[in-house]
Image (spheres, coloured by chain):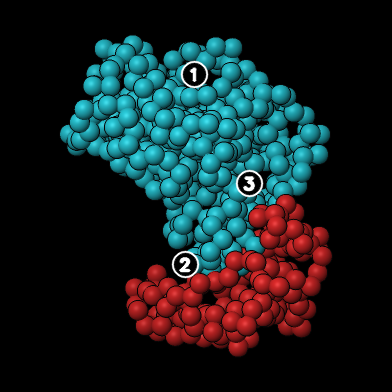
Chain colours: A red, B cyan
Amino acid sequence: MSYEKPLPVLDPESTPFWEATRAHKLKIVKCGDCGQVRFPPTSFCPHCSSAKIEWIEASGKAKVFSWIVVRHPVPKDVYAMDVPYVVALVTLEEGVRMPTNIVGCAPEDVTAYMPLKVQFRDVTPEITLPVFAPHKDPRP
Amino acid sequence: MFALRDKYAIAGIGWTEFSKKSGRTVRSLASEACIKATADAGLKISDIDGIVSYNFNDSAPAIAVATEIGVPQAGYAVDFLSGGNAANLIILSAVAAIEAGLAKTVLCYRAMNGRSGFRLGGGRDMSAYNITQYTAPFGWITYPQAMAMWCRRHMIEYGTTPEQLGEIAVQFRKNAEHNERAMQRAPITMDDYFNSRMIVDPFHMLDICLETDGACAVLVTTTERAKDMVHKPIRIMGGAYGGGPDQGEDLFDAIRWPDHAHNYAKYIADDLWKSAGIGPKDIDLAQIYDCFTYSIIMQLEGLGFCKDGEGGPFVQGGRIAPTGELPLNTAGGLLSEGYIHGLNHVVEAVQQLRGDAGVRQVPNVETCLTTAGAMTCGSALVLRN
């Protein structure tokens, strides 16, 4: 069965991100000059305007910033089997925010600032999506 | 900062029927509203020399409307590729065009087959390119889904409740009952609100505005010229457009936005009130952009009608009713009157300030705020009679 949901169309700025997720790694951009990290990846640093880019691997740990529970599927035929599902903005340990899905728990159990860990979903042979699941962090 | 206090005015307003299926071209809706706004001011189309609108590739361009209605020569004909955030910006741009000498009399319109044609709220195109490659693959596609994410942050930070959102929906429907333009006039109760379908938690169906076919237009000129026209000029005291840092790559995107419990309103408040020379306490009534119930709360806080986090309690207890301390969205708003992308708020403001709002007229009105936009950027006007 073909995959009906939206798939990322890679561009020169995003290709390293999606190549990394395909290898089950989560990577973000760090400015080669001032060191500020950013997501989504863009060509210039909004802090110092530098074009020098380093890709760093994120720890994969994150916390819930905000979330929604989609109950009415749009488009209906594409998401009918998925609802209810959780879309979240999560804050990575490195400080940037990222949209994702929260998996591995009931939608009702999601709470603000809940600790999460990245998981990788190979949705097609070419594309892997980073999703997050609840994670008990032993550190304080 | 806008520095032309009271120099410009709205001299004409026009609108079409608001429906679910107009059976007409968007251009003809725009033309009807523009012809009516021109006639309302007591002018002829030959007096028009500027025209401006905003759209999401779902409308007719300004030159197409100018052509249909027979504008002889337009020194200013501009389309903003923009959302509801531009509903007040196009009026400021009309003022700027006149001040620059590009035109003297400018029609500002928004037209859409928002239900029978392109449904803005129903989802964007399913391709996930540019910024949408980081959102759409996770099933994060529609504007209600975008705004629900903001609303949750307000609930997390301030404990805002569904009852408070419901209060907004119920009050605006009550207001629409007295508005012959409104698409939804049957009263609703708080039970109806809670029983309405959960679309995207925390939003019920009744938190989400209507999809509408229709058009609105307003005619902008100098206050001096407007004095010779049919109605008392409704003067533009002040105005502002903008937002904060990290406004994102499009209207949906707010990944880097500092704090989703606060929207653009917080960032334009100082400019708005300074330009108008008055403050929130001097506002008699307000037409606040309500694509969703929640957007009201952020704008009340951001513009200083209440403190951060107090927007929820503020809307309770009748304060926003026509008889309350700050009557809001007296025509029913985008939630119950219709969604002409916020320009219908300006039409209602002008009717109220003229004293022409019929049974829904709020007594002794001298000043009215209008706002446009819900997320990272927006615009606002302070109008007076």
Contact flag, marks 2 and 3 (Cβ < 8 Å):
no
Secondary element under disc 2, as helix, strand or loop, is helix
Q: Residue at 59% across / 19% down in the picture?
A: B179
Residue B116 is left or right of residue B88, and the answer is right
Q: CA distance from mark 1 to mark 3?
A: 29 Å
Residue in the image at 58% along x and 70% along y? A7
Q: Residues within 10 Å of mark 1 (few under 14, many from 20)?
A: many
What is the distance, in whole Å, between disc 2 and disc 3 at their CAs? Answer: 34 Å
Between tags 2 and 1, which lies in front? 2
Q: Quadrant of residue B93?
A: top left
Q: Amino acid at mark 2?
A: Asn
CB atoms of marks 2 and 1 within 8 Å: no
Q: Nearer the viewer, residue B352 or B365?
A: B352
Instruction: Please name the residue that numbered disc 3 is placed on.
Output: B309
Q: Quadrant of residue A113?
A: bottom right
Mark positioned earlier in the residue sequence (2 or 3): 2
Q: Element type at marker 3?
A: loop
Q: CA distance from mark 2 to mark 1?
A: 43 Å
How many residues crowd around disc 2 within 10 Å: few (fewer than 14), some, or many (20 or more)? some
As drawn, B123 above or below A132: above
Q: Residue furthest left?
A: B101
Kind of residue sitting beneath label 3: Gly
Labels 2 and 1: the sequence-earlier one? 2
For the residues beneath circles 2 and 3, the answer to whether they share a chain is yes
Residue A10 pos. (x, y %):
49, 75
Tell me the number on the disc at residue B130.
Answer: 2
> Which chain hosts label 2?
B
Residue at 74% from the left image edge and 74% from the top image edge:
A133
Mark drawn on residue B352:
1
Chain letter, disc 3 residue = B
Residue B229 lies, with reference to residue B264, above or below; the image says: above
What amino acid is labelled 1 in the image?
A: Gln
